[in-house]
Amino acid sequence: MLKKYIRAVFVIVIYLVVAFFILTKLKMPPHNLKKFLSIYFVYLLELNFFLLVIAFIVNFKYIKEIFAGIEKKHLLLLASISIIGIFTTSFIAPRTHRIYFDEDIYNNIGQSIADSRKAVMSNEGYYENGELKVISGEYNKQPLGYPYLVSVVFRIFGTNELFSFILNNILLGLTVVVIFLIVFLFFRDTFAGLIACLSYIFIPVNLHWFNTCAVEPSTAFFTSVTVLALSIYIKNKKPINMFFFATALAFSLNFRPESFLIVIVIGLTFLLKDVKVFVRKELYIFGTLLFLLLSGVILHLYMVRGQDWGSGGAKFAMDHLAGNFRVNSMFYLDNERFPLLFSILGVIGLLFYKNKSYIKGKAIILCWFLLFWGIFLFFYAGSYKFGQDVRFSVLSYVPFSIFVGLGVSFIRNLLGTKVKSISLVLILLIILNFTWFLPFTRAVGDEAWASRIGHKYAVEFARLLPENSIVFTHNPNIFLLNRQSAIQSSTATYNSRIVRRYLDQFKGGVYVHYNYWSNVNDPTQKVFTENILNRYDCQTIKEYHYRNFKYGLYKIKGPKQH
């Protein structure tokens, strides 16, 4: 009895210490808090990731037990679907950025973490002896989970944007395996699991975004891993399973602000499947670890709470509901970017799969879908036709695919005795239906064409720069990722002496990049490039014209003589 009281007091003290730490940091001036988080958050994520890997290793035997109950032919099919998914997103969907210039920012923050152990977007950076020195950086508004993940890849393999694309490609294949395991643990139906996986890799928008450097693929993956870890705990009820669940949950909440919605799904799952968890000690013991690991993202979300994210008003409001609901509902019905067949099968799975004993499982999956689909109905940029914000739909595809799997399984069970080879017929139907979406899947699209072309030329310009040179640009991250020193163009306006200093310092030359922001109808942005070109004699190195935009690289020779 005494041990229980001591343990309880110890747990409470840890909660209070972490809470006191967070409250203390909340009182810091914003500038100091950003500086603190740029370092603290990195090491906290490093700890979280390390513990997650350890938790996965010590829980692997429980995952092996799940696979042991599945026939080898089904495991081979699962592996095949996973590989096909990786291949399809890598080589059929275009490998391109789709959200500009966020993907460059994510990669650059990952680069900064890898090279300087600071989570900042570089506004000024030099390469010295092949090593990046971040001179001036800015803390970003997005949580750091994905940039941290990129930093791990960059640390191991070196800085190269290609590795970020490959990371997301591989995550698609891993998500497929996680989906299968979730379906098996929830419904004990291998066929439904395989079809859920097959449908997941045949969603065209999904394939698009898993071949980008965007954050949504990793968000979907780690959210799914959390649900899997939760299912493993509920199945075995071992403290070591709770360790896996706590570390997975903590890590998954560091990708997007909406990631916290999974907590509601977790609460519902405990209420429906394991309400006695609330009297078990491991929930509160590992809860202290969870609280500590979340301290970084809690401080981060508090710090960025006042940012408008470009909305010009309330980010979330009822005013957006009607329009977003109409567009985002029709997305699943118009058979243009999402297969109508999947919508029909998903509804069948939701309404008719199995019997009442599966209602709890379907309620949890439905809650998961509705939360990650519904949250964007209230978001000012939540419409799936607003720019590239269809990427938000990626967060709801895992639960949707599970319902597709259930629907196809229901049809097979219904017609199995009447139609020979019904399983093969249904699989071929899904594959044939996907062929109608191959042209869309291959398409880059015309959205953000000016930014995409600008990015393409910026990479080309980076390759033209000689060693020991530096370039003034609105997008230093693109050049830094291509191992060239760069600085924000605005610096030359606010500090006119810096150009002269750089002309002496960089023997390879000082350059100015005429880019997307130099063309847009925004006087604040255009003036930064114009000031440099008007004040200094410049030599044209390369220049392109595309539609009504100009892109160029110019070498600064020296001040103009008046």
Image (tube, rainbow, N blue to C red):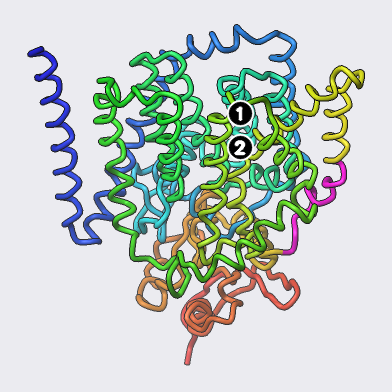
Quarter of the image where one finds residue 136: bottom left
Establish if 366 lies above or below 136.
above
> Total of numbered circles in the picture?
2
Badge 2 vs badge 1, beta-carbon distance below 8 Å: yes
Residue nearest the viewer, comparing 175 with 190: 190
Residue nearest the viewer, comparing 347 with 427: 347
Asked whether the viewer can see residue 190, the reply is: yes
Question: At 63% from the left edge and 65% from the top edge, which residue is drawn?
Answer: 386
Q: Amino acid at mark 2?
A: Val
- Label 2 or label 1, whichever comes before in sequence order: 1
Indicate which disc residue 279 carries: none
Label 2 element class: helix
Residue furthest front as drawn: 356
Indicate which disc residue 398 carries: 2
Q: Quote the CA–CA distance across marks 2 and 1.
A: 7 Å
Residue 368 in the image: state x and y as whole percent.
Answer: 53, 40
Question: At 40% from the left edge and 60% from the top edge, which residue is drawn?
Answer: 124
Residue 246 in the image: state x and y as whole percent.
Answer: 36, 28
Residue 394 horizontal side relative to residue 441, left or right? left
Question: At 75% from the left edge and 11% from the top edge, which residue is drawn?
Answer: 73
Indicate which disc residue 179 carries: 1
Label 1 element class: helix
Q: Amino acid at mark 1?
A: Ile
Residue nearest the viewer, comparing 264 with 435: 264
Question: At 61% from the left edge and 8% from the top edge, which residue is drawn?
Answer: 69
Residue furthest left as drawn: 2
- Mark 2 closeness class: few <14, some 14–19, many ≥20 residues within 10 Å: many
Quarter of the image where one finds residue 195: top right
Residue 545 in the image: state x and y as whole percent.
Answer: 73, 73
Q: Say whether residue 2 is magenta.
A: no
Magenta stretch: give its range: 435-446
Residue 476 in the image: state x and y as whole percent.
Answer: 49, 60
